[in-house]
Amino acid sequence: MGRKFFVGGNWKCNGNTEEVKKIVASLNAAQVPSQDVVEVVVSPPYVFLPLVKESLRSDFHVAAQNCWVKKGGAYTGEVSAEMLVDLNVPWVILGHSERRALLNESSEFVGDKVAYALSKGLKVIACIGETLEQREAGTTVDVVAAQTKAIAEKISDWTNVVLAYEPVWAIGTGKVASPAQAQEVHVELRKWLKANVNADVAASTRIIYGGSVNGGNCKDLASQPDIDGFLVGGASLKPEFIDIIKSAE
Ligand code: PEP
């Protein structure tokens, strides 16, 4: 199937110039598996993208944490997909649960953003995931399927999409999904893709897990057959991010 392991580091709204330089220096000095084995993408806040891009080792890449849903213009505070392309930023994270929850981004809006970003040549880390209430109500699979459907309805080519399953109850909480819990949802997502998109997309799309991944739990999670990597928040700011990258091996 050839799904290359993917490790994304979401720095969220953290850091200053000094701290960003330190993180980049530590990433640049790290011994990690080759690009044939693992794709590493770090996502600093917009304002640090040029600094990170020019100073980061060439085998790692950068992502923006968001972009606007259509061509730029009179949208104060937004950054367009075209601007990211202009800066040679190859990736963008879309649909993160913090934006869904805090900024009311609907699944339809996220689907539109994914479609627009792809149409401009960006690669997309598309985030989905259920809340604790939804998990406890037994609706996890319905929720992530609906979120995926809202994306699938707007795109025809999944080549440049990485799907990040991030249960909301696991993000930033220290409560990681067990390897079995994550694997179960990834399998259901692959089944959904097979039934609703096609078998090729189901087999080739990378489905990564996010939610309190750290240096201690990454190996067990990575050993699951349908976990193709991670989106890492808090731990991506720390030296253990290197251990997480190494779990690709
Ligand atoms: C995230 O923000 O995507 C994330 C998974 O955060 P954390 O690793 O801190 O739970």
Image (spheres, rainbow, N blue to C red):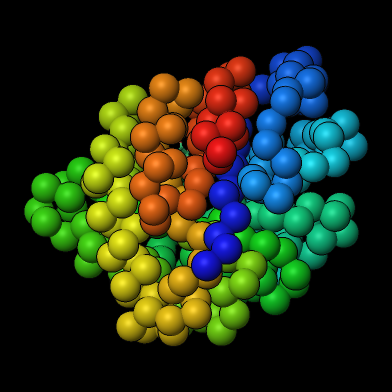
x, y percent for residue 97: 41, 48
| Res. 169 in view | no
Depth check, front residue: 179 or 238? 179
Looking at the image, residue 233 sits to the left or right of residue 41; the answer is: left
Residue 168 seen in render: yes
Image-based side of 34 in relation to 53, left or right: left
Q: Position of residue 207 (x, y in %)?
A: 46, 57
Identify the residue at horizontal 36%, vertical 47% (top origin).
224
Q: Position of residue 214 (x, y in %)?
A: 45, 26
Asked whether 167 or 35 is in front, the reply is 35
Labels in figure, total:
0
Asked if 221 appears above or below 24 in the picture, the reply is below
* Left or right relative to 70: residue 162: left
Determine whether 153 is above or below 138 in the image: below
Residue at coordinates 31% horizontally, 73% vertically from top-left?
A: 191
Give the residue drawn at x 31%, y 48%: 182
Nearest the camera: 12 or 1? 1
The quadrant the C terminus occupies is top right
Identify the residue shown where x is 68% and y is 36%. 33
Q: Position of residue 135 (x, y in %)?
A: 17, 50
**Corner quadrant of residue 28:** top right
Examine the rendered structure and indicate whether residue 62 appears above or below residue 56.
below
Residue 57 location, quadrant: top right
